[in-house]
Amino acid sequence: MTKKYWKDWQNRIGETKNIYKFWNYSDGKKMKRFGGILNNLAGDKLSKATFNHTTDTVDLVIERWHQTFSKSIHIQNEYITLNREDIACIEFNKEYNT
């Protein structure tokens, strides 16, 4: 992810729909991962993002929604740290014209 896009994402964190990472292959190539980090169909959502400007990382708290065998919903927080260079792109809920 470019530094400009990284800064733009920080200003639009509440609009984050999904986060896509790169696959790193053994030959050094990077390709965009097809499945995003958030499962929007299951109700997952990004509840917090803390950006570390010295290391270009972001600490994410993701609410994971799981349906149990008794048909009740279990919500669990997952904590992920991502490096700026490992993020392929961000999908936003609303797009705006610049």
Image (cartoon, rainbow, N blue to C red):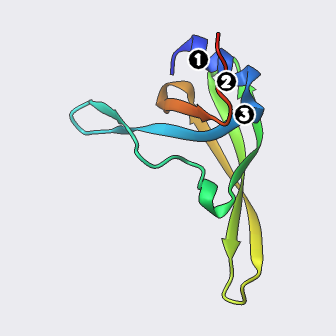
SS at mark 2?
Answer: helix
x, y (%) of residue 48? 78, 41
Within 10 angstroms of label 3, few (less than 14), some, or many (20 or more) residues? some
Q: Does residue 54 appear anywhere in the picture?
A: no
Locate the C terminus and report the quarter of the image it occupies: top right
Q: Are marks 1 and 3 in contact (CB under 8 Å)?
A: no
6 sits left or right of 30 in the view: right
Q: Are marks 3 and 2 in contact (CB under 8 Å)?
A: no
Query: Looking at the image, is mark 1 or mark 3 earlier in the sequence?
Result: 1
x, y (%) of residue 96? 67, 20
SS at mark 3?
Answer: helix
In the image, farthest residue toward the left: 27
80 versus 40 height, above or below? above
Residue type indicated by callout 3 = Glu
Structural distance between the alpha carbons of marks 1 and 3: 14 Å
Residue type indicated by callout 2 = Trp
Residue under label 2 = 9
In the image, farthest residue toward the bottom: 70
**Identity of the residue drawn at 76% across and 66% down:** 75
Quadrant of the image occupied by residue 14: top right
Residue under label 1 = 5
Residue 7 or residue 12, whichever sits in front: 12
**Identity of the residue drawn at 72% across and 85% down:** 71
Residue under label 3 = 15
Quadrant of the image occupied by residue 55: top right
**Identity of the residue drawn at 76% across and 81% down:** 72
Structural distance between the alpha carbons of marks 1 and 2: 6 Å
Which circle marks residue 60 in the picture?
none
